[in-house]
Image (cartoon, rainbow, N blue to C red):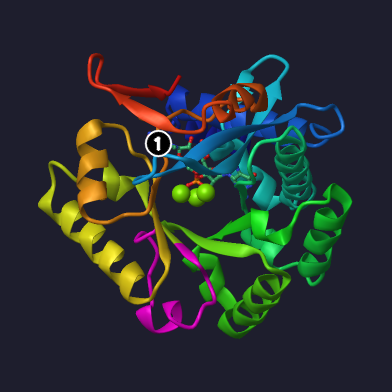
Amino acid sequence: QAKRQGRNQFQFYSPEINAQLRQRLTLENELHGALERNEMLVYYQPLIDLHSKQIMAMEALVRWQHPTLGLVSPTKFIPIAEANNLIVPIGEWVLRTACAQNRAWQLAGFSPIRISVNLSARQFELPNLVEIISQILQETELEASNLELEVTESFLMADIERSMKTLKQLRELGISLALDDFGTGYSSLNYLKRFPVNMLKIDRSFVQDVMTNPDSAAVTDAIIALAKSLRLNITAEGVETQEQLEYLQMRGCDEGQGFYFSRPVPADIITQMLRQPVVVCQPKNNRWRQAG
Ligand code: C2E
Ligand code: MG
Ligand code: MG
Ligand code: MG
C-alpha cells in the first residue's frame, strides 16, 4: 500500500524535474574526489579600466571538467559544494591556483595586475581563513595588493561583528576587498560604510538592461553615485554591448567586465591578451579587440 502510494506520488514530478534531481545526485556523488582527480579548472575573465582601456585585473572563475558531462558551470556545482563543505578545499585550491597564476604572469614580465577570487560563505566562516590566505600569499610569493577577494553582502550580514573583524584583518594584510553582485542583497547602507571594502561590483542584472529599463538605469546610477561618495572603486559586471559600455563610461564607472571584452577563458589565452594589454575599439565590426 505504502509502496503504491509512493509510486503514485512519484508521478507528481515531471520527467524534467526527475532528470534534474538525478543530475544533481550524480554531481553530488562525483564532486567528492573531483579535486584529487584533477578535474577542477580555473578560467579567467579580464576587468578593464573603462577610461584607459587597460586590463586591471582578472577574476578567477572555477569550472569542473567532468569526464562525461563536459565543462560544468559553477552555478551548478558551487551550491552542492557549499552544502557539503567541499567548497572549503575547492575554494582553497582556486585561491592557490589563481595566486600562483598571477605570480607566473608577473615573472613572465607582465606588469602586475590584481587577481580577484570569489569567497564562499563557508570559507568566510573558517576561524583560520586569514592564516590560510596569508600562507597562500607566502607560498606563491604574490604581494597581497595583487589579490582581491569577492564577498557578498548576504553572507557578511549573517554575523556582522565577526565579518567586520575578518574583513579588517584581510585589509590589514594589504588585500583588497570587493562586494560582488552589489544591489541584489538587502544592502544596509549603514553597514556598507563600515565594511572596510574597496570595491563595489554592480550586479549583471542591472547592467543587462540598463539601456531598456529605466529602473535598472536608476539603480546603476545610484550605485555609482554611492560608490563615489564613499570613495569606493566601482566595477560593472556583465557588459555585453557597446551601448552599455558607453553608458557606464558616461556615468563614471571605473572598470567593466563582460562578454563584450572577453568571456572567461583558460590562462594561456589570457597570456596572449596580456601581450597587448590595451583594448581598442573596432567600429567596423562593432566589437572590441586587442590592440596590435
Ligand atoms: P560571479 O562571481 O558574479 O561571476 C560573474 C559571472 O558572470 C561568471 O559566471 C561570468 O562568466 C558571468 N559573466 C561575466 N560577464 C558576463 C556577461 O557579459 N554576460 C553574462 N551573461 N554573464 C557574464 P560563472 O563563471 O558561471 O560563475 C558564476 C558564479 O559562480 C560566480 O558569479 C560566483 O558567484 C560563483 N563562482 C565561480 N567561481 C567560484 C569560486 O572559485 N568560488 C566560489 N565560492 N564561487 C565561485
Ligand atoms: Mg565574482
Ligand atoms: Mg557577480
Ligand atoms: Mg557571485
Q: Residues within 10 Å of mark 1 (few under 14, many from 20)?
A: many
- The three-letter amino acid code for the residue at tag 1 is Gly
Determine if residue 119 is in view: no
* Residue at screen point 33% across, 38% down: 239
Q: Is residue 7 above or below residue 75?
A: above
State which quadrant residue 161 falls in: bottom right
- Kindly tell me whether mark 1's CB lies below 8 Å from ligand 1: yes
Image location of residue 121, percent across then percent down: 63, 61
Q: Nearer the viewer, residue 128 or 58?
A: 58
Answer whether residue 149 is magenta in the image. no
Q: Is residue 260 above or below residue 238?
A: above
Answer whether residue 187 is magenta in the image. yes
Number of numbered tags placed on the structure image:
1
Determine if residue 192 is in view: yes
The residue range painted magenta reads 182-199
**Magenta stretch: dominant secondary structure:** loop
Image position of 234 (left or right of 102): left
Image location of residue 223, percent across then percent down: 29, 64
For the C terminus, the image quarter is top left
